Structure formats: C-alpha cells, structure tokens
Image: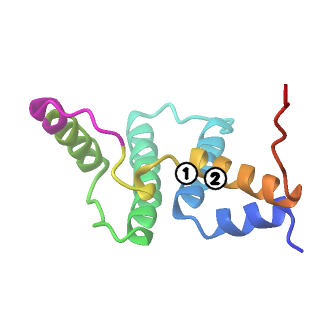
Amino acid sequence: MPTLIANHTERANANADFQYIWDQKALAEDINGAEQLPLNEQARVAQRKDQEAQYLAIENTRRKAKGMEALLSLDEMFDTAEDTAAEGSESGSEEGPKSMDDEDALITETARILVDAINLSGPVMARARVR
C-alpha cells in the first residue's frame, strides 16, 4: 500500500512545476553560496549573463514539458507577463486561473496530500446529535 510520502514523491517527480522549483532553488543556492565575486566589470557581466542563461534554460525546460514555446530571453517572459496583465485590466476581467495547469503547483499538491491522508485514515462518518 503506497504511503503519503511515496504518493507525493511520485507526483512531484513527474510534475514539471516541481522540477522548475527545485532547479531554481539549486541555482539560487549556488549563486548565494559563492564565496568569491569577481571585481572586474567584464567578469561580473559575464557571470550575470551566465546566470541568466541558466535561469532561461530552467524556464525553457518547464515550458517544453508543458507544451509551451521556448523563450529566447528572460525579457520575453517579463514582456509576456506585462502584456497579459495589461489585457486583463483592459477587459475589466479579474478571473483566476483557467485550468489546473495554471494553478500554483504547491497549492495543488497540498490538496492532493490532504486527499491522500483522508483516504489512508479510512472511512469517516459524520454523526449528528439527535435532540
């Protein structure tokens, strides 16, 4: 019988959004853990470009897994987000996500873990007090 942890691990490993979160976390830890920073301006610019390329690769991996078009630069991602926000405010629509894929992966997985916990605890019957 699968456990809560096994179910979660299986779902998380198959979820592109979780992979994205873990990859971004690992890159941020690498960047924050650097003990030396170059003082040379050219070296700093090269380092920043390398980090941006790594973030772009992580984003494009997620986009490919979700069947979306790859981005050529991080600027495209921010331009697209601004365009989408502008379109939503022009139409007066403040709708939430359109599908489960658009929702936050962490919130969705939290709900799934809760369902697993309920299912593992066995049948539950509500009891009403009769007065």
Question: Along the horizontal axis of the image, is 76 left or right of 29?
Answer: left
Question: Along the horizontal axis of the image, is 109 left or right of 69?
Answer: right
Question: Along the horizontal axis of the image, is 8 left or right of 73?
Answer: right
Kind of element beneath mark 2: helix
Residue 95: horizontal and vertical position, in percent? 29, 38
Most extreme residue toward the bottom is: 1
**45 is higher (above) or lower (below) than 13:** above
- Name the residue carrying label 1: 105
Q: Residues within 10 Å of mark 1 (few under 14, many from 20)?
A: some
Q: Is residue 116 magenta?
A: no
Q: Quadrant of residue 48?
A: top left
Most extreme residue toward the top is: 131
Residue drawn at the location 26% of the way across and 41% of the way down: 81
Q: Which residues are magenta?
A: 87-96
Residue drawn at the location 45% of the way across and 34% of the way down: 40
Task: Kindly indicate whether the residue at mark 2 contacts the one at mark 1 (C-beta within 8 angstroms).
Answer: yes
Name the quarter where the N terminus is drawn.
bottom right
Check disc 2 and give the amino acid type: Glu
Residue drawn at the location 38% of the way across and 48% of the way down: 49
Check disc 1 and give the amino acid type: Ala
Instruction: Estimate the spatial distance between the alpha carbons at disc 1 and disc 2, rounded to whole Å.
Output: 6 Å
In the drawing, what numbered circle is on residue 109? 2
**85 is higher (above) or lower (below) than 11:** above
Q: Quadrant of residue 87?
A: top left
The mark total stands at 2
Q: Nearer the viewer, residue 85 or 125?
A: 125
In the drawing, what numbered circle is on residue 13? none
Residue 35: horizontal and vertical position, in percent? 69, 35
**123 is higher (above) or lower (below) than 14:** above
Residue drawn at the location 64% of the way across and 46% of the way down: 30
Most extreme residue toward the front is: 131
Kind of element beneath mark 1: helix
